Amino acid sequence: MKTTFLLSLLFALFSLNICAEQMVSVKQINLKKSLKGKGQQQPGTRSLEPLDVFAYFNPDAAALSINLDCVYTDVTVSVKSILTGETIQSELYFTPTDIFVNMSGVENGKYLLEISFGETLLSGEFSIE
């Protein structure tokens, strides 16, 4: 009876450890807010309006995840290489709430994520290693 309990407890702790390791690998991308064509960037957390867009990069799944807490129309998501300036991916979404961008097959390096809607441009850097 004690052996079964101890084995069950050990299995439960091992399972929690695996879940914790998986959650650590997802990295939040710090988005900066600016107006299109104005070039003045401000951290989203210091803007007058709360920033309700969050972006994450999951290196295990090689995917970007973008969560929009409000519904925006005509959201453009672009990924550019910081080294070359080349646009790797760019797509227009009409009324998204969650956007997933597949980054598999993209070479290691530093990239710039740009999310634009209306007069707002959000941008943040991330790395693929």
Image: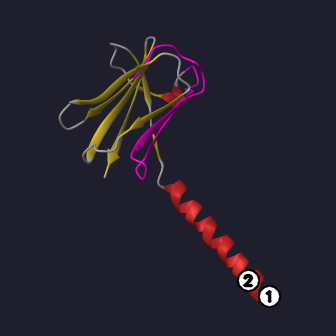
- Please tell me in which quadrant of the rendered image residue 20 appears: bottom right
Residue 50 in percent (x, y) is at 58, 24
Disc 2 element: helix
Looking at the image, which residue is at 31% across and 52% down?
129
**Farthest-out residue, right:** 1
Disc 1 element: helix
- Tell which of 16 and 112 is nearer to you: 16
- Tell which of 29 and 108 is nearer to you: 108
Residue 88 in percent (x, y) is at 27, 32
Between the C-alphas of marks 1 and 2, the distance is 6 Å
Amino acid type at circle 2 is: Leu
Q: Taking 49 as reference, is 37 left or right?
A: left
Residue 56 in percent (x, y) is at 47, 41
> Badge 2: few (under 14), some or many (20 or more) residues near its Cα, within 10 Å?
few
> Circle 2 is placed at which residue position?
6
- Please tell me in which quadrant of the rendered image residue 89 appears: top left
Residue 111 in percent (x, y) is at 30, 38
Start-end of magenta stretch: 48-76
The type of colouring in the image is: secondary structure
Amino acid type at circle 1 is: Lys
Up-down relation of residue 40 to residue 128 (above or below):
above
Q: Taking 11 as reference, is 42 left or right?
A: left
Up-down relation of residue 8 to residue 113 (above or below):
below
Q: Does the magenta run of residues contain 75?
A: yes
Looking at the image, which residue is at 82% across and 87% down?
1
- Asked whether the residues under the numbered discs 1 and 2 touch, taking CB atoms below 8 Å apart as contact, a structural biologist would say yes
Q: Does the magenta run of residues contain 40?
A: no
Which labelled disc corresponds to residue 2? 1
Q: Taking 99 as reference, is 124 left or right?
A: left
